[in-house]
Amino acid sequence: MSWPVLNLSKALERQDEIISVFFLCTKTHHTVSALKSNVLLLLYLHLTSPFLFSSRSVDFIPYIFTVFPDVDLCIITVPTLSPEFLLLQSFTRLPPRSTNTSPPREIYVFQRSGLRSVEVRAAVPADRPAVSELVKTLSLRESLLEDLDRFYETRRDKDGVPLQAFVSTVQSEVVGILIIRDEQDLQYLCARYNIESFIYFSHHRLEEHAHILHFVLAPSFQRCCRHLFKESLRLGHKSCLFHRLYPPHISPQNSCVHHLDILLDCAVPVRPRRQIVFPLEELGINAPSLQIREEQAPFALSLISRKLTLEPKVTVNARIVLVGASDTGLSFLEVLCFCPHLRFNSLTLVSTHGLLSDFDHEDIGFLSTSHAYSSRDLSRVPLHSCVSVVSGKMVAINRKSKHVLVSGGVTVPYDHLVLCTGLQYQAPRPAEVNQPDSNLQLPSNLFTLNDLHDCMAARRLLSANFVELEDNAIVYGNSIDVFTTVETLLSLGILGNRIHVVFTPPEPGASCFSDPEVEKAVATALKKAEVQVHHHCLLALMNNGENPDPLTSVTFTTDAETLNLQCGVFINLSNKAVDSEAFRSINDSFLVFDSRLVIDATFHTSDSSISAAGPLTKFSRSYYSDEWSNANFNSKEVGRDLAAMLLRLFDPTLEPAMETPPETERLVPLYGQAKIQGGKLPGGFHFLQVTTPSATQLTAPPVQQDSCLVTGRVETGNYFSLHLDSYEQVEALTCLSLKPLPLSNYLSLYGKQQQLLGQLSSRYQQGLIPDLHSFFKQSWCLALYHDRFSDFEQELQQITSHTGDVSGQTVEDGVSPAPLQDRSPSAEVRAAVRSSAVRYLSFNRNLLPMFAGPGQL
């Protein structure tokens, strides 16, 4: 069968310049069984002046449909790695049906009906039948129609909040509807989300903010979405629209949005803000308003403003596949999801148990936490709307065909593959068993805990079938997770004398806790709870080498005699390494693996389309820095840097990367944010440890006694240890408390200069600080915990740098300047600093009302 091919050419004259546009088109069948073709495939587009007149290519769409009067659809296919050109912005992208069928090309469609103009007006009662027909297939149509009826009757919702409704019509046919209500939680949104990255609240009246209740638009008119929002803002006298996107497990099913992708193409995602933990008892009436402090169900927030309706996004169709929902991987996805001017259409996460955002480590227990992401944090990131999740393990990588094979037979194609699987506790292998790992049968009452899914499964079984029994629970390993697991077992009601902690031989120089006081307190708590502790043990046999399921006895080798224990439940927290399936996938695809996956300073593996980061990786030996790896640093910071490297390929606003000087091309990247570890330890202690990144094989110099500030005692449950470096900046802190810790506040202390903390060092030496916990609860400290305090610090640095030497002193030849602490700032600097501080407190008064403003004293 031969298809008719037509070469269309047309010329437009503008200021003595000829613009030639050529379309090569062919007719194809809309369906296999179609007797008549109604689809036009645009094969070739050429502009002689693409940079000057590319926007004029859209003028030829009506002409194409005139030449082909029997055609209803015009289709363009482009490679996934091809940047979107202006003509495609008038077309509608067709998403693939599933992740594993994602083709190497994207399909864009323009329907003949799209040639008609779209009008937006306020809804009238006569529109209800047409609206009902438009939404008849949607599950939440009843909620939308109820709010539409309330608008017709009272112009208000059931709570008395004003409503507005707008419809978009094409030749009197309703093709879309938008229902909004006045925003009632503006103070909460301003305090919890960084909205002022996009708008200034002082430029908008309170009544100009609205919340999107319902939004439905026919897919054929997706390209008119921005026009619908722009006209609705104008007709409704609004300047900003907000949309709340709740996670599936807590979604209030009363907002009808179809399709969500259409709305998100016009909106910008708004980052959540770090929150201050307020000491309400100490503040009294000076605390922020209840509307700000009261917690609501977490949601991801999107914003549409008048200005943003005129700013199209850059569409990225590249298939980016992330393997592993580790802290590094989630941080990588967070950066991509919050790019306001980019829209990633094909982000895929491959994770063993999917995206676990329903529960927190603190609620489930067993494992320690890095405090990188809580369930609330993940709910406030638009992961569910921007990322496709494939549950399963990566079992193979096909570099030639560029796809990942996932357990269950799912194939996930990629253009860019990112590996962030991290390290996992491996299934215990008895020393006297010679079977390969793949043939080793594991008992049903043996739990190897690596994520929340494993912990929830163990918690359910223990609560239902083990607590009331008399069998032993054996915890095997040598990490902080052993102690947090023991505390969870005790909290479930399991008696301490039934719990056996079996420590594996520690690595040389390694310790679960950097502070000996914490280690001593935990040992005392274990002894008090009558938990049995065994040191320097290695698993030798399960059930004496017989049928291992269920596991009833285990044998360990020790430095002395053999240890035999009866077993009801065995919890394994030993041998943290690269997952066996991930290792086989990497090794079989011939990526360089040297005990870890080898990367360069820009996260690239030996394959330029495959990147990796996190504890899974190590730097190439050509860098001569075996003591440093991604595992030495804060995982969120590493993930953000990984995303920044990838964004250079897609973000047109970024400047091209400068060529690396020869003297620095062999340097590995180093990061400055703190390593964080926490959890609940035996004795009911809440534990937090914040340390500066350090090399693996190097021993840090001993901390001077005068740089260590310690208050409280572990026995009284108020222990606080804080270390200052040679620049008198906070480089480490350790907290052990019987009361919950204000985590956000304490994490903000890292890197702060002690003078900024109220002359902390000198006041401590004078005996004026008996309790650091109480000291950091004082109201003056709250300004330091504010998420915008770092911006204030930068402003102060600019003030001092622009005004020169703070004391106005000059340095003469051979004369050293006075030490910084002995200099006195000039009157000009003092006035500038005072003015800057007043502006900072006034601008953030909603969260810092405990500070008096100008004219209040």
Image (tube, grey):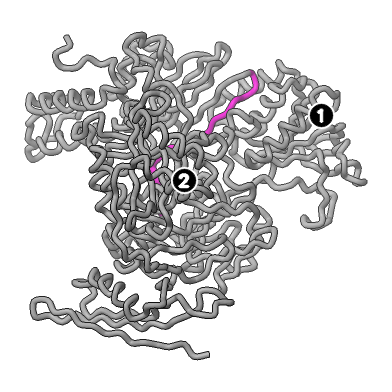
Give the secondary structure at mark 2: helix
Q: Which residue is mark 2?
A: 132
Q: Which label is found at residue 465?
A: 1
Answer with left or right where residue 318 lies relative to residue 270. Answer: right
* Cα–Cα span, label 1 and label 2: 52 Å
Residue 378 position within the rendered picture, expressed as x and y whole percent measured from the top left: 49, 39
Name the kind of residue labelled 1 in the image. Answer: Asn
Name the kind of residue labelled 2 in the image. Answer: Ser
Compared with residue 769, is residue 174 higher up or lower down, i.e. above or below? below
- Report the span colored magenta: 669-683
Q: Farthest front residue?
A: 126
Answer with left or right where residue 52 lies relative to residue 503. Answer: left
User: Residue visible at 32% across and 77% down?
Assistant: 66
Q: Nearer the viewer, mark 1 or mark 2?
A: 2
User: Residue visible at 49% across and 33% down?
Assistant: 376
Q: Which label is found at residue 206?
A: none
Mark 1 or mark 2, which has the lower sequence index? 2
Q: Nearer the viewer, residue 348 or 267?
A: 267
Give the secondary structure at mark 1: helix
Residue 811 position within the rendered picture, expressed as x and y whole percent measured from the top left: 9, 37
The stretch drawn in magenta includes residue 678? yes
Answer with left or right where residue 452 lies relative to residue 214. Answer: right
Which quarter of the picture shows residue 164?
top left
Residue 658 position within the rendered picture, expressed as x and y whole percent measured from the top left: 28, 62
User: Residue visible at 39% across and 80% down?
Assistant: 43
Q: Nearer the viewer, residue 218 or 706?
A: 218
Q: Nearer the viewer, residue 395 or 83?
A: 83
User: Residue visible at 77% across and 55% down?
Assistant: 437
Q: Residues within 10 Å of mark 2 (few under 14, many from 20)?
A: some
Which quarter of the picture shows residue 715?
top right
The stretch drawn in magenta includes residue 565? no
